[in-house]
Amino acid sequence: MADGSTTEARTGEQQRIARQEAARLTAEGVHVIALTWVDNAGIARVKAVPTARLAAVAHRGVGMSPIFDVYTFDDYITASPHLGGPDGDLRLFPDLGRLTVLAAQPGWAWAPVDRYEQDGTPYPACQRQFARRMADRAAAAGLEVRMGFETEWAVSRPAPDDGFDAACAGPGYGMTRVVELSDYVRAVAEALDAQGIEVLQIHPEYGAGQFEVSTAPADPVRAADDAVLVRETVRAVSARHGMRAAFAPSVVAGDVGNGCHLHLSLHRDGRSLHRESGAPYGLDLAAVAFLGGVLDALPALSAVGAPSPASYVRIVPSQWAGAYRCWGVENREAALRLVQGAWDDPDGGNAEIKCVDAAANPYLLVGAVIAEGLNGVSTGAKLPPPVVGDPGRLSEPERRERAIDRLPTTLSEATGLFERQEVLRDAMGEVLHGAFAAVRRAEAERSAGSSPEEIVATTRWRY
Ligand code: GLU
Ligand code: MG
């Protein structure tokens, strides 16, 4: 509709594509299509439709209650000023451009959806459309933002009481783990490749049974879609190998957790703004301002990027989770790490936001980061001197002097900062902002008084 075509022409075209796609999928033996969106608790929710219904769904969408926007990670239902209660219905429209045959779920395909009101207007709490609006806003400011997530997970054998029992014993980053789980790791890489996801790296991580996969940069909406697809693929491959994958921020309280770091790079007219010759750190002034805006906003962004009670079990100093608001060049303890890349790679420079995890709704996270980066550009934000070494090892007065703040240590602290952050309220709009804050409040209240072990036990298999 944004291209000026009429609704009828657009839906007619969508139906034509859907009919072609349905024929192709049927020939490939696909019977069911999973249509997903991610709610404010960071959980991918689904409606599935038979392949034969794809054209009808492309035309009129699929119904779904808006109440999921006030669901918490444990399926408790809260309410916000605009959303809650049993009334109302939405129409879910699959993005046919992302229709993907699922390599580890024979007979299934997948597509992400955009959510609309029954009268065809965009649903104001649709997180995926929020991400697209923010990417469009960046484009209108002459900036192209490329993004990519690193997915970390811990793989477990089935264990009593929904516990965790690492499925491999080898050391962190050790080849032993790749030998122990050779077929499994290969199957993950193969499935992602078959689904058109470009894997950059796949390797064992530090934590018990922990692995990571990083994927190629893409436009922000595609990057968020990829994060969903990567996670569900890893989950499906794990199940087919008789194992379970935990993406939760903390899998064993006190151990290193799972991050889901967000990489971003800025470009103008196809040129990287991380490769400005003669500029400090190679950063064009617009990139400095964008990253400065993100850095300033990290405390409020915590509610979006680290939204679970379990996020605050994970995000502690000296675990490479980025517990302090600071940036550094290739500093893995800084919440914002400037990645230099190979000297002769024109697109190698990027920035990594480390204080974020897989409980985050990836669409909200990419959108919120762009909103804050663009705010930095319009206010002329700056970057302070970079931090070298672990900021946790500086003395308290040194940190205070350099404004290296500890990021929020509880979900309620992060939520309070989010609620007061006007940039995010304006960007998200009252309906989405209010529903998101209500879910954070409910999750904080429901976990108040719980020990880290209890929080980890209730969140371990939810994301
Ligand atoms: N597992 C760490 C985290 O919680 C990240 C390790 C790394 O730098 O990749 O974010
Ligand atoms: Mg990692």
Image (cartoon, rainbow, N blue to C red):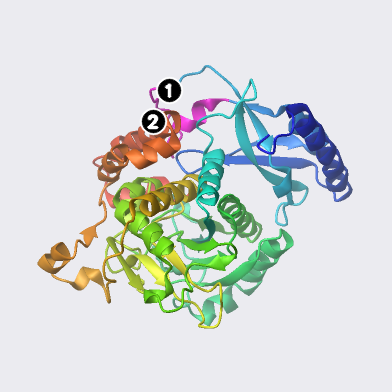
Please tell me which residue is depicted at 31% across the width and 39% down the height of the picture.
444
Say if 314 sits above or below 350 in the image.
Answer: above
Q: Amino acid at mark 1?
A: His
Magenta highlight on residue 71: yes
Q: Amino acid at mark 2?
A: Gly
Q: Residue 439: which quarter of the image?
A: top left
Most frequent secondary structure within the magenta stretch: loop
Say if 443 sits above or below 25 in the image.
Answer: above
Q: Which residue corresponds to mark 1? A: 82
Q: Residues within 10 Å of mark 2 (few under 14, many from 20)?
A: many
Residue 242 numbered tag: none
Image coordinates of residue 397 in percent, x first then y, are 10, 66
Which span of residues is magenta-colored?
A: 65-83
Image coordinates of residue 300 in percent, x first then y, are 31, 47
Q: Secondary structure at mark 2?
A: helix
Q: Which image quarter has ligand 2?
A: bottom left
Q: Earlier in the sequence, mark 1 or mark 2?
A: 1
In the rendered view, does 289 fall on the left or right side of 109? left
Image coordinates of residue 216 in percent, x first then y, are 60, 65
Say if 59 sits above or below 299 in the image.
Answer: above
Residue 434 numbered tag: 2
Front-lying residue, 72 or 122: 122
Please tell me which residue is depicted at 17% across the width and 71% down the height of the picture.
394
Please tell me which residue is depicted at 41% across the width and 79% down the height of the picture.
278
